[in-house]
Amino acid sequence: MIDYVAADFDVHLISTETNSGGVDRAAQNILGRTATAAYAIKWSAGGTGAGLVVPSALADQGVRAVAAPVRTRDGRLWSERDGRRLSVVPWVGDRQGLDGGLDEQQWREFGAVLAATHALPVTPELAAVLPVAGHEQDLASIRATEALLQASPPADDIAAATRHIWMDHAQRIAAAVDRVESLAPAVTPSTVCHTDPHLGNVLATAGRMWLIDWDDAALSTPEHDLMFVLGGTYGAEHIGDQEREWFFEGYGPVTVDPARLAYWRASRGLADIAFLAGEAFTPGDYGDTWRAKAVRLLAANLRPDGLIAMAMDSFDGRPSTRTP
């Protein structure tokens, strides 16, 4: 890896170590250090180049809350090594937003970086790499997880607990699938979105914040990103009315469509429980410590204050306007 990075990016590392953060099973994440700087290195076999093209476009506009990728010697945003995409990004921040939340200035900057993202014109370069967000893969994951839980006997107590939680909520899960399918016609993705801006993907240091991990960037609707501030998502314990007020001071006025918000909440909620249940039910691959945590997260996602429950709440169909 040290040789690859030097040859492709003219960055001369003196050490590397595995960075175990993240759940992207198709990627190898590495912290690399030179004599004077640190870099996040990603060597991935999955996804698209959108996770590098979008933050690069934002950085070109002067948005400081993104870490612009280091370009290769010949000006590209990534290189290809052994059939995998290799990228190098400056290492930023000293803690996640999950660790204590954000302060007033950081919340405003969080709002501003998402507003800038949603205002990006869809250039030919972006259109070439941005997928169109939708629910098909999420519902396919639900069906695959249901089949797994029904076809295989639990291998241990963790797997048994996983099946028990799923079966207890089977009707709610089925209803959420129906809601996603019924709301899909109201959703027309046309806006550049991060699609995963929870506080685990926010890095902070004194007076600064950065939104990272753009790998799931896609054409969507603003509600796909805004739901992570409006409640029910990972890290929501750090987000109250005051934090939302600061966020929208940075973001600016916006009209939130309730049908689109419910659609993305239900779709994301289903994707999360499918992922958690699948890994918790299957011993051997990721270790029992993670599997036990996945069971707890599965139960938390299905609580009355989770995304699926929020998506299933009735709404009157009228858009709501948020103003700073």
Image (cartoon, helix red, strand yellow):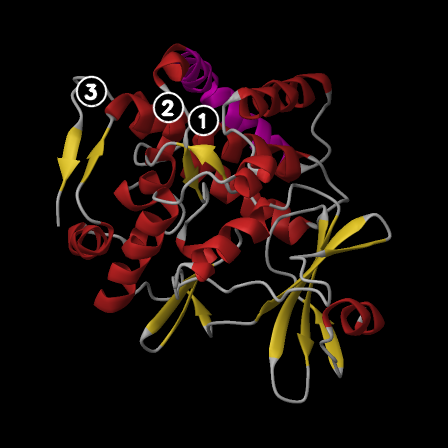
For the point 33% across and 39% down, the residue is: 227
Question: Could you say where residue 95 lies in the image, as x and y percent from the top left?
Answer: 45, 70
Residue for badge 2? 263
Question: Could you say where residue 53 lies in the image, as x and y percent from the top left?
Answer: 56, 50
Circles 2 and 3, Cβ within 8 Å, touching? The answer is no
Q: Main secondary structure of the magenta part?
A: helix
Vertical relation: 203 (above or below) 224:
below
Name the foreground residue: 17 vs 278: 17
Circles 2 and 1, Cβ within 8 Å, touching? The answer is yes
For the point 41% across and 16% down, the residue is: 184
Question: Could you say where residue 32 lies in the image, as x and y percent from the top left?
Answer: 69, 74
Mark 3 / mark 1, whichever is N-terminal: 1
Q: Is residue 173 magenta?
A: yes
For the point 48% across and 53% down, the residue is: 57
Q: Amino acid at mark 1?
A: Ser
Q: Please state the extent of the stretch shown in magenta in the rendering.
A: 159-181
Vertical relation: 319 (above or below) 69:
above
Answer left or right for 322 relative to 284.
left
Task: State the mark number for residue 267.
Answer: 1
**Mark 2 element type:** helix
**Mark 1 element type:** helix
Q: Amino acid at mark 2?
A: Tyr
Q: Is residue 156 magenta?
A: no
Q: Quadrant of the N terminus?
A: bottom right
Name the foreground residue: 26 vs 52: 52
Q: Amino acid at mark 3?
A: Phe
Mark 2 / mark 3, whichever is N-terminal: 2
Measure the C-alpha gap from mark 3 to mark 1: 17 Å
Answer left or right for 258 relative to 186.
left
Circles 3 and 1, Cβ within 8 Å, touching? The answer is no
Measure the C-alpha gap from mark 2 to mark 3: 12 Å
Residue for badge 3? 315
